[in-house]
């Protein structure tokens, strides 16, 4: 019995959809990737965005051939991580928590390079069929075939009787996921009324492969090291009103605000790229599955960016799904069966719940007044003791959830 007679259909390109396509291309099923456009290069919105990956995600991307195919200046190791708060403004490198290893703890990758590299690999993979279509419709049972397949329809269809059969649908279509909405899967959202400003800064002193996170009264700010020794990616979360003022400010005003809030970290910064901002509205789906449908990445969960774990969760989704599909095929069962999907949802729950609670909780504690920030800072200082720090490192690396 063919475990997937109607194939696997991945809806949505980008970081999650591309990784899922590359990971599942070797499983033997017909695989179709749907994108709204067929981009030759990454969108401009990704030009200054970066993605942080942990050790498990690095190995995953390396196994897919992505790491070796990246441009040399696209990926930067992190060998030291420092977390501080505004009580150490005079000495911004004094940590609440710190990790320092000779081997990389994590890596920073430029989004446009990562997207373009995966897109090139997909073009070279015959097992992946690419379609340009805006998929918006989902039918739990195909209109003609019944329960043996689900159905997909496109906003681009000129007739109403086109319904593509699918053994399994993977929704990688983003936080506003049309497929999630079509499946009537509800979400839980938390609006901290914050936005994040991202930019590339040129520092006065070398970052020395250090990732730095500071909790200040305006919101958490982070600098992630880039391949050039004086360049770093800034992610600064703050209230929406404050973000609007800083986005509209001239470069000199913005740099003064950054240097003041950061305590002249790495000697301060003297140059900045164009700035971008985006709203922070963490949300997660009440369930990541429906009949023959599974949500991955931002379609299933989007968390606060302060820990840089968003894409690691998406890769965790893909790794677990690939494992479940492989086991189901070994048993000769339909890869879209309900038992497989339920097993996937159960397996992903612990990590997603832990990361959601950790990021939401830290953001709430450090954004709720000086006294609460101070208490949170004391708690993190206590967590700097070796046993707790080792546990935190295992959680951040992804290894605690038994992914290899």
Image (cartoon, grey):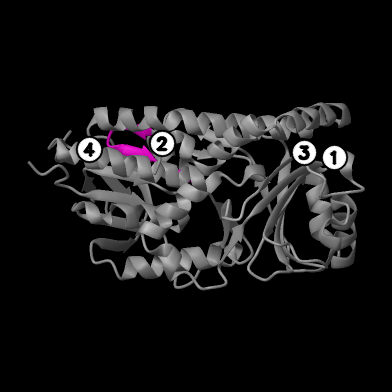
Mark 4 to mark 1 CA distance (whole Å): 49 Å
Is residue 404 visible in this depiction of the protein?
yes
Dividing the picture into quadrants, the one containing residue 341 is top left
Q: Nearer the viewer, residue 104 or 342?
A: 104
Residue 357, given in percent of the width and then of the height, sits at 60, 29
SS category of the residue bearing label 1? loop
User: Which residue position holds label 2?
Assistant: 402
Q: Residue at x 74, y 32 (%)?
A: 380
User: Which residue position holds label 4?
Assistant: 327
Circle 4/circle 1 CB separation < 8 Å: no
Is residue 185 visible in this depiction of the protein?
no
Dividing the picture into quadrants, the one containing residue 225 is bottom right
Circle 4/circle 3 CB separation < 8 Å: no
Quick one: label 1 or label 2, which is nearer the N terminus?
1
User: Which residue position holds label 3?
Assistant: 96
SS category of the residue bearing label 2? loop
């Amino acid at each position: 019995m063919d475990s997937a007679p109607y194939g696997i259909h991945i809806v949505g390109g980008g970081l999650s959809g591309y990784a899922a396509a590359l990971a599942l291309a070797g499983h033997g099923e017909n695989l179709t990737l749907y994108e709204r456009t067929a981009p030759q290069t990454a969108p401009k919105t990704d030009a200054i965005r970066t993605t942080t990956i942990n050790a498990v995600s690095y190995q995953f991307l390396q196994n897919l051939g992505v790491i070796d195919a990246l441009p040399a200046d696209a990926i930067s190791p992190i060998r030291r991580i420092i977390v501080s708060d505004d009580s150490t403004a005079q000495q911004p490198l004094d940590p609440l928590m710190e990790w320092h290893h000779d081997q990389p703890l994590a890596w920073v990758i430029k989004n446009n390079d990562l997207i373009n590299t995966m897109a090139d690999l997909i073009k070279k993979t015959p097992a992946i069929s690419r379609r340009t279509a805006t998929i918006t419709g989902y039918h739990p049972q195909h209109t003609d075939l019944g329960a043996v397949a689900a159905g997909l329809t496109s906003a681009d269809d000129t007739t109403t009787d086109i319904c593509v059969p699918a053994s399994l649908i993977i929704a990688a279509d983003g936080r506003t996921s049309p497929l999630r909405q079509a499946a009537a899967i509800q979400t839980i959202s938390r609006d901290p009324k914050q936005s994040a400003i991202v930019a590339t800064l040129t520092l006065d002193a070398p970052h020395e492969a250090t990732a730095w996170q500071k909790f200040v009264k305006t919101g958490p700010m982070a600098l992630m090291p880039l391949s050039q020794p004086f360049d770093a990616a800034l992610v600064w979360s703050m209230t929406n009103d404050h973000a609007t003022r800083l986005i509209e400010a001239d470069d000199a005003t913005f740099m003064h605000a950054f240097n003041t809030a950061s305590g002249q970290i790495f000697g301060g910064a003297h140059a900045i790229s164009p700035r971008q901002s985006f709203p922070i509205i963490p949300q997660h789906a009440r369930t990541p599955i429906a009949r023959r449908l599974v949500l991955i990445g931002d379609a299933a969960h989007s968390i606060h960016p302060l820990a840089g774990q968003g894409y690691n969760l998406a890769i965790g989704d893909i790794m677990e799904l690939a494992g479940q599909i492989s086991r189901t095929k070994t048993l000769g069962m339909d890869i879209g069966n309900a038992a497989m999907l339920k097993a996937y949802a159960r397996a992903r729950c612990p990590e997603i719940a832990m990361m959601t609670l950790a990021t939401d909780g830290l953001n709430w504690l450090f954004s709720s007044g000086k006294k609460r920030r101070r208490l949170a800072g004391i708690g993190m200082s206590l967590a700097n003791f070796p046993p707790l720090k080792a546990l935190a490192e295992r959680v951040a690396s992804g290894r605690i959830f038994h992914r290899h």
